Amino acid sequence: MNEAPQETLANLLTEDRTFPPPPEFTRSANVSAEAYEKADADRLAFWDEQARRLDWSKDWDQTLDWSNPPFAKWFVGGELNVAANCLDRHVEAGLGDRVAIHFEGEPGDTRAVTYAELLDEVKRAANTLTDLGVEAGDRVVIYMPMIPEAAVAMLACARIGAPHSVVFGGFSVEALSSRIDDAGAKLVICADGGFRKGKANALKPTVDEAVDRCPSVEKVLVVRRTEQDVDWNDRDLWWHETVANASNDHEAQAFDAEHPLFILYTSGTTGKPKGILHTSGGYLTQASYTHRSVFDLKPENDVYWCTADIGWVTGHSYIVYGPMANAATQVMYEGTPDTPHTGRMWEIVQKYGVTIMYTAPTAIRTFMKWGDDVPARYDLSSLRVLGSVGEPINPEAWMWYREHIGGSRCPIVDTWWQTETGAIMVSPLPGVTATKPGSAQRSLPGITVDVVDDEASSVPNGGGGFLTIRDPWPSMLRTIWGDDQRFLDTYWSRFSNMYFAGDGAKRDADGDIWLLGRVDDVMLVSGHNISTTEVESALVGHDTVAEAAVVGAADPLTGQGIVAFVILRGGVESSPEHLADLRNHVAKTLGPIAKPRQVMVVSELPKTRSGKIMRRLLRDIAEDRQLGDVTTLQDSSVMARIKDGLQAAPED
Ligand code: ATP
Ligand code: MG
């Protein structure tokens, strides 16, 4: 039994810093260490208890039906209305005057929307959708900027049982029309445009062109935001002429716990996006539980701010459904972080007294690049919890976040999850966990994440392997929309009886989990499987580097050679000696096996709309190949600029 395990993924980086939660924080935390014990003792009873925090019109008969894996049913027989859980019950409880959304438009216009006002608007929108012939089960595509109407549209769909599919406002005609088509949407809700980077950014022309290609669409409902000129078609209706005049009398009907709530396409970092299907009762249970426990939300006092876009799963679970089910007050910001200046985010934190902030490593690394002096100009003392999501966070970025944003006093929760998982799965609990820079640490109570080797055996502490989920969880995806076979092939065929997440991970000496990037990106160097994350973190650990992406490129000697693309911190000039220094720095930090064959300085990296680095395109460059699919890139011209820049750069 005790044979030396075959190495699945090398463990090279060690990190000794730990930060226990402040004792006052622990004393008043929503969740204590006891939650793990309770969930371990009886996982389903634990989830029953969390589900009871919601209002159900009909109780469930069975917590979990797993008789036909991997097709799970949670809270079987139960009925609820998701929107009523996010709105009506709070207003009925006397919280109608609480601000739900502090909206900050990019040009500086603001609106405070209370729970009573939000409910009123959602009821009108629900009546409008019904008038337009949208019925329970019909799909609605939402293509909007970050304005309160985006949340209203989602909640109105939820209220009438029409699954929504939000498409990031800014995707191309192709990306939008293929998603409308795949979902077979009957209605599209959009806006004339939104404000981004100081300009009115039109959305309606993209919708017009996309809908021309999609025969399923009957109507297009248009919110007026920028007031720019738009072409008008017979199928178009203005929101302010329909929703505003609709009745605000609407009784929410309860739906089955397994009624579809939304379809959301994954970011497309690794390939063709998948239409992930989520349902109602289990999803809302886990979104609301995790929002309350991971961020320690105290809805009476906290001002919460998640900087994600509504077109990404984080915007679904941690702007709309989780926070609103918990009656949170939150900030919603329309624009980009550097408009009109690089201190905009911190100005907003100061202005609204934000207490909980949830953002992505890509944003944190950008703030680092802009310099410590920017946040230092603002009063950030209201902050008490910081969150990170989207990619592994490099230890140096984590430390920067802690010191320069969190004033060295706020617990940081690094939350691992996916569109597919629906809600957070691996994360510290801020009042319980002694945090470690760069580690997501352990499964939340009621969740059984594991790290396994090729043979599906748990790796010992110190070992690396594949991240898997052993037991079904309430907010798990139910299938890929219209493609059960792809659902089985992608997630359930790599290992039997386990969900395969597609991410590499390791367990440290204490058993804590560290995410190591995507399995597809792992580099095979002289027989060792080396993670992109560890090499990138070593590079970001050098004081001249702001951001790094590494890939394995075919190499005649070693199988693959590590090629690194780095963005330097402001004011740093590169030279052949500097590049050699970076390569040696990695070798010194991680060992000679991880020494990059080549380091290239770039000014940008290819990223998806949700800010994730697309390594597969860098691999195409490193191996001098034709570029693969670029439709989910944030900026499709970036690859040409990277290539041009490399031709002009000094040789390593
Ligand atoms: P596609 O599956 O189409 O390639 P995607 O995986 O980028 O798209 P998302 O569901 O938005 O789409 O992203 C989930 C992925 O993001 C995870 O599988 C993981 O790779 C990464 N991720 C998210 N949060 C973390 C985190 N805290 N630490 C490490 N990685 C994370
Ligand atoms: Mg994915």
Image (cartoon, rainbow, N blue to C red):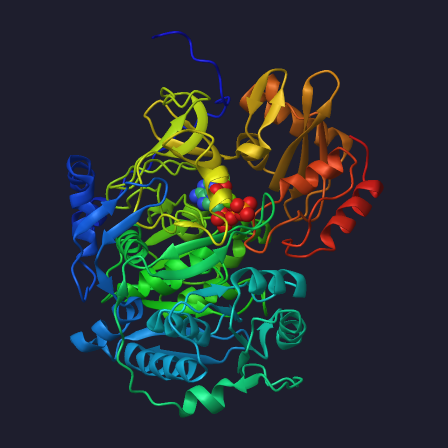
Q: In which quarter of the image is residue 449?
A: top left
Would residue 545 be seen by someone viewing this image from the given angle? Answer: no
Outermost residue, right direction?
Answer: 648
Observer-nearest of 522 and 114:
522
**Picture mark count:** 0
Relative horizontal placement of residue 501, taking residue 381 as reference (left or right)? right
Q: Which residue is drawn at 56% across and 71% down?
A: 216
Q: Residue at x 60, y 48 (%)?
A: 272
Observer-nearest of 234 and 308:
234
Would residue 170 be seen by someone viewing this image from the given angle? Answer: yes
Q: Quadrant of residue 306?
A: bottom left
**Quadrant showing the C terminus:** top right
- The x and y percentages for residue 314 are 43, 56
400 shown above or below 56 = above
- The x and y percentages for residue 279 are 35, 57
**Quadrant showing the N terminus:** top left
Q: Quadrant of residue 592?
A: top right
Relative horizontal placement of residue 570, taking residue 111 as reference (left or right)? right
Q: Residue at x 71, y 44 (%)?
A: 628
- The x and y percentages for residue 341 are 58, 66
Observer-nearest of 457 and 23:
457
- The x and y percentages for residue 222 are 54, 81
